Amino acid sequence: MQLEIVTNQSKKQKETKNLVIEGFLGKLGKSGFSTEELLQITNHFWSFPKKSSRNKQWIMTDESGKLLGTMLLKRENDETSSLKDYLTLFKQFPKKKILKLLTIFAILEHDLKENEVYIDHIVANKNNRHGGVGTALLDTAQQDILPNEFLSLYVAASNTRALRLYQRKGFTIVETGNSFIRKKLISEEKWHYMIWKKPSSLKTRNQKD
């Protein structure tokens, strides 16, 4: 398996976006849009990090170049889409469905804290979900961060398989929440916010105590 960073100039953008949308279809599909429509819509305001960005879109491929998984590490918030982008969507698609989709995106959005590296999404190809792709991507994330940084992510409480993986990789739950809006929109009421810090940073802090 091979790992690389893709940017907004990469030829693998469309394939990677497709993989992410398929991985989150259980949530995004609640808007009523198909995979093809979601890809068309997100192209209006979703672009991969530039080479100069501190954010990194990692992809994993096999020897033949087949995409196995992807993960976005965010160190800075995305640029805000213009009003024109949203108005275009309302003209092209049913207003009620677009409003619902944008609300789903809003409740999934996360504001970064100081020194936080947020795993915005981590997705494995459905045919390779038991092939160690998620573990390899998490290993990459843990190696990527600096000693003063920490990793974070959200996971649905009902997603026990992913929760066990994160806990096995050393992530700990620091917050658990319940949301009626999330339940109504994406059938996901309870969620966990988890973090991971490099062991060396924990040792240093403990030594000072």
Image: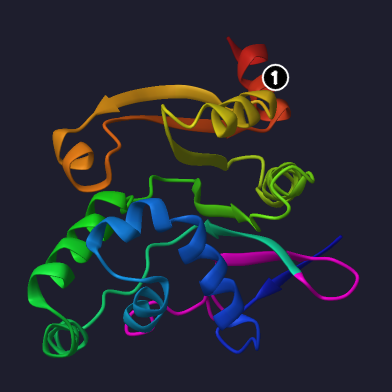
Quadrant where the image shows the C terminus: top right
* Residue at x-position 12% and y-position 83%: 90
Q: Residue 47 in magenta?
A: yes
The three-letter amino acid code for the residue at tag 1 is Lys
Q: In the picture shown, does residue 137 fall above or below 168?
A: below
- Foreground residue, 173 or 135? 135
* Residue at x-position 24% and y-position 56%: 104
> Overall secondary structure of the magenta stretch?
loop
Q: In the picture shown, does residue 163 fall above or below 117?
A: above
Res. 209 visible in picture:
yes
Return the residue at label 1.
203
Q: Secondary structure at mark 1?
A: helix
Measured as percent of width and height from the top left, residue 102 is found at: 20, 65
Q: Residue 163 in magenta?
A: no
144 vs 189, left or right, is right
Residue lying at the far top in this picture: please name it.
209
177 vs 35, left or right, is left
Residue lying at the far right in this picture: please name it.
63
Residue lying at the far left in this picture: please name it.
96
- Foreground residue, 204 or 67? 67
* Residue at x-position 22% and y-position 86%: 85
Give the colour scheme shown.
Answer: rainbow
- Foreground residue, 37 or 109? 37
- Tell me the magenta residue range: 43-66
Measured as percent of width and height from the top left, residue 181 is found at: 15, 41
Measured as percent of width and height from the top left, residue 83 is found at: 14, 83
Judge the density around disc 1: few (<14), some (14-19), many (≥20) Cα neighbours within 10 Å: few
